[in-house]
Every structure is written in C-alpha cells, then in structure tokens.
Amino acid sequence: MFTNNQRQEERTGKHGTPRLQYLQLVSQFQNATDEETKERIVANLANFAYDPYNYTILRQLNVLELFVDCITEPNEKLVEFGIGGICNACAEPKNVATIVEADGIPLIIKSLSSPVRNTVNYALGALYYMCDYNRATREEILRPEVVDLIERYAAAESVSLENTKDDDFAKSFCIAMGQNANATMNVLRIGKALCCG
C-alpha cells in the first residue's frame, strides 16, 4: 500500500522510528561483515523501493546506487535483491536518471543472464520502465545483444514463469523485438506486470 505523510505518522506512532532514520540501513550495509546481514538489509530496502513516498529518501541516502552496486556482487541473493529494488523504483523518472548516471543499464542487461529466475524477471521489469526514460536509454536497451540474451532466456528448457497468465512471456518478447517498437513495448508491459505488480 502506498503511503502518505498522514498514514506514515499513524503507522510510525509516538515511539516508532521515522522512515528517513529507518532507511539509513545503507550505513549498516557498509559496516556489515557477513553476507546474510547484507542480504537482509538489501531485501528490506528493496521492499521500500516500491512506494513513491520513499523515492526522495532513497535518492537522498544513495540507496539506488547501492542497488546498482549489489548487481556487481558475486552473491546471487544480493544481485536478486538489488535488481528487485531497481525494478521497484524505476517507475519514477528521477530514480531512472540516478540509475542511468550510475551506469546501471549495462549491469541490468547483464542480469538477464542470471541463473536466478527472479533476477531475470526483475531485470525485464526494470528495462521496461527504463525504456520510457528517453530515446538514448531506449536504444541502449533495445540493442540486438539484449534481444539475444532474452532469446536465450526464452529458449531455456527450464524457463517457467510462475504465477503468470502468460507462460510464453520471454518468447513473446523475443518475437516482438523483431517487430515494431509498439509491439515490443506491449510485451515489456506484460513483463512489468509479471515481476513488478
């Protein structure tokens, strides 16, 4: 559920932790020495990234850059949660700008090769949102190399998009990539709905 100031005050209560203070988990992440703690922190931050109420705070605290950094980690859970946070936050153009400035697009595209299904689905959803940012971003995302990654994902025998109405999403995406931009965007919209709600 999306939050507003009044609802946030009601939920926080008299003795609760204000959202800005709570979301300063970034410093805890930087000081954490074990992977499980880092995973838990990034998962919590990614969960907050879906709510527009938190967007400004996430940018102030450099959480979006943290998500991008997580994509470069060898830990698949950090990659999954990082790309999930990016997917959740990409509905806001200012967040997309931050991710683009942090050189996130090549890393998101690289995530399409992940062995983790959620990571690939989150990457597809993030790319959908980012296609609408500007023409240069769209062209970078819709390159033939990206189509190849998605085709390989669609061709994999183990592909099974759980909880979806369209089991052939990746295959449909590939077909549309060879067609016109409107068809491509329609398939990306389906992908966004599948992985990002």
Image: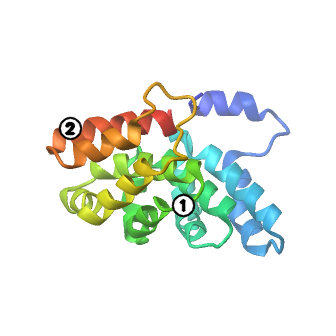
Q: Secondary structure at mark 1?
A: loop
**Image quadrant in which you'd find residue 58:** bottom right
- Is 72 on the left-hand or right-hand side of 125? right
Q: Secondary structure at mark 2?
A: helix
Q: Residue sitting at 43 percent across and 63 percent down? A: 99
- Depth check, front residue: 69 or 174: 174
Q: Which residue is mark 1?
A: 114
Residue type, label 1: Ser
Extreme residue in the front direction? 157
Find residue 125 and report its horizontal and vertical position in percent: 43, 45
Residue type, label 2: Ala
Find residue 166 and report its horizontal and vertical position in percent: 43, 29
Find residue 156 and report its horizontal and vertical position in percent: 47, 51
Q: Residue sitting at 30 percent across and 66 percent down? A: 145
Q: Residue 68 got which mark?
A: none
Q: Residues within 10 Å of mark 2 (few under 14, many from 20)?
A: some
Q: Which residue is mark 2?
A: 183
- Depth check, front residue: 16 or 165: 165
C-alpha separation, residue under disc 2 versus residue under disc 1:
25 Å
Find residue 175 and report its horizontal and vertical position in percent: 25, 43
- Is 109 on the left-hand or right-hand side of 82? left
Could you tell me if residue 23 is visible in this image?
no
